[in-house]
Each structure stands twice: as C-alpha cells, then as structure tokens.
C-alpha cells in the first residue's frame, strides 16, 4: 500500500468483520499519510518495504505469508476497489487443488457501474489481447485481485517488476503447466487518486512496462511442466 489512508478504515473494518484481519499482511511501500499507523491501531500486521514498486511490495508480503506457512496467497488492493466478500470464491478452488492461479476479473462490474477511467479500460483490453496473441492465455481482465498456491508462487521465482507483476505471474503459471482460471469479482469506487491509472501518462507507462515484460518472457525458453 502507498498512501491509501482514505480507503483503509473501511477495508480494515470489512476484514475484521469477516475474521480475516489477523491473516492479512499490509505492505507499506513508503506511505506518508499515516496509513501504516491506521493498520497498526486496528490490530493489523504491517511490514515496510522501502524499495518502491508494486513488485517489491508483493514479494515482501508473499515472503511473510510463506514464513507463516500459508498454502494460498491472495493479492488484494488497499484502495477499497476489491471486495473482501469475494475472497471465498477466489480462494476456494485453489485450496481444493482444482486451480493453481485464480484471477479476479473486473470486467462485468465495470460494465455495470463504471468507476474505471476510459484510458485504463483501453490499456487493460490491449494487454489481454497481447496475452492471448503471444501466449494463448484467455482472460477478460488481468486484474490484481487473485489467489495463487504458495508453492506455485515460489516455483515461478517472480521478479519485482514495477508494473508487470500480475502479467508475469499469469505467463509463468501457464508456462509451468499450472491451471489458470478467472472469475468475475466486484470493482468498487476507489478512495483517493490512483498512482498509475489516475493519469493517461501513468496508464501508458504501465502498458509499456507490461508489454515489454511480455516480449522478454516470449523470448525466454518455455519451462512448461506438469503442474495442476
């Protein structure tokens, strides 16, 4: 999380009501708005990752989950757009062993009520088209809200990309033979301004980073295995 104090009270209350706050790890990536203190006062776990970038924060959080012995790791935004009520549906198939990676799609929620800037929608659409064209992966939306087997995440040896963490996860999972599925999830109005989608320039920079990662991985030898 990075300067998400406006959204945190609501999210913390939702997680606490669902009995999930004690299982959550909030990775603070250099906030200056006191969001880390809000989490601590609510009884949540905060770890600090001084290296800026989404991938660094995700890697740090995944490491803590691994130390706790988690079998499944869920990545969730701290800006209030993701709904904790979707967690059982995301996690269930992974816990049952039917899926290696379950991706939450915001497509239907955005179509119903909007809330996502047009340039972000276009960038997402172009990214999933490229995923299909280059790797044969069919996703309606490569959203950040997702659940993945902890052992699969370790096997993927993810790199701390600023923008392409989610993309690398999908491509890596497919390439090692893991089953990747998706399901529609909620997409709520965010609190505060997005650091990436809040501007056309930020969205374009994200797409360039994502597409560059796709090309790099396309040129890397396929490590396809026999995962489930």
Image (cartoon, helix red, strand yellow):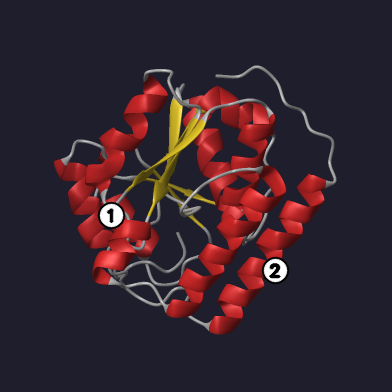
Task: Say which of 130 and 219 sits in front.
Answer: 130
Q: Evaluate if marks 1 and 2 touch, with contact meaning CB atoms under 8 Å apart.
A: no
Looking at the image, which residue is at 57% across and 49% down?
Answer: 166
Q: How crowded is mark 1: few (under 14 residues within 10 Å), some or many (20 or more)?
A: some
* Residue 97 is at least partly visible in this image: yes
Q: Position of residue 201 (x, y in %)?
A: 60, 82
Say if 4 sits above or below 47 in the image: below
Of 116 and 137, nearer the camera is 137
Q: Is mark 2 on a helix, strand or loop?
A: helix
Determine which quarter of the picture holds residue 34. Answer: bottom left
Q: Position of residue 43 (x, y in %)?
A: 26, 45
Outermost bottom residue: 200
* Pointer 1 or 2: first along the chain: 1
Q: Look at 32% across and 69% down and name the residue there.
A: 190
Label drawn at residue 163: none
The residue positioned 57% from the left and 74% from the top of the image is 203
Residue 5: give x, y in percent of width and height: 33, 67
Could you tell me which residue is drawn at 61 percent across and 50 percent down?
167
Q: Is residue 27 above or below residue 199?
A: above
Q: In which quarter of the image is residue 36?
A: bottom left
Question: Residue 221, percent across and down?
Answer: 84, 35
Name the residue that disc number 2 marks: 208
Q: Name the residue under label 1.
A: 186
Visible in this render: residue 75? Answer: no
Residue closest to the eye, 117 or 152:
117
Q: What element carries label 1?
A: loop
Quarter the N terminus occupies = bottom left
Between 32 and 2, the residue placed more toward the observer is 2
Q: In which quarter of the image is the C terminus?
A: top right
Q: Distance between the residues labelled 1 and 2?
A: 26 Å
Residue 220 located left or right of residue 209: right
Q: Where 44 sits versus 174, above or below?
A: below
């Amino acid at each position: 999380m990075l300067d998400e104090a406006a959204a945190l009270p609501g999210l913390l209350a939702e997680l606490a009501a669902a009995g999930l706050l004690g299982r959550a790890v909030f990775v603070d990536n250099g906030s200056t708005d006191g969001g880390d203190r809000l989490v601590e006062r609510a009884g949540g776990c905060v770890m600090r990752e001084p290296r800026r970038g989404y991938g660094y924060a995700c890697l740090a959080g995944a490491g803590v989950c691994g130390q706790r012995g988690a079998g499944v790791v869920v990545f969730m935004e701290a800006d209030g757009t993701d709904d904790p009520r979707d967690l059982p549906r995301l996690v269930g198939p992974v816990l049952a062993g039917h899926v290696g990676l379950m991706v939450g799609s915001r497509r239907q929620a955005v179509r119903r009520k909007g809330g996502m800037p047009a340039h972000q929608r276009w960038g997402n659409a172009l990214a999933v088209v490229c995923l299909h064209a280059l790797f044969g992966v069919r996703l309606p939306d490569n959203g950040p809200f997702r659940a993945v087997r902890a052992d699969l995440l370790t096997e993927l040896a993810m790199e701390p990309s600023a923008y392409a963490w989610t993309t690398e996860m999908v491509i890596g999972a497919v390439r090692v033979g893991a089953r990747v599925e998706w399901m529609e999830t909620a997409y709520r109005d965010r609190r505060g301004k997005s650091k990436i989608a809040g501007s056309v320039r930020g969205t374009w920079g994200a797409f360039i980073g994502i597409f560059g990662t796709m090309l790099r991985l396309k040129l890397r030898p396929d490590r396809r295995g026999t995962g489930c």
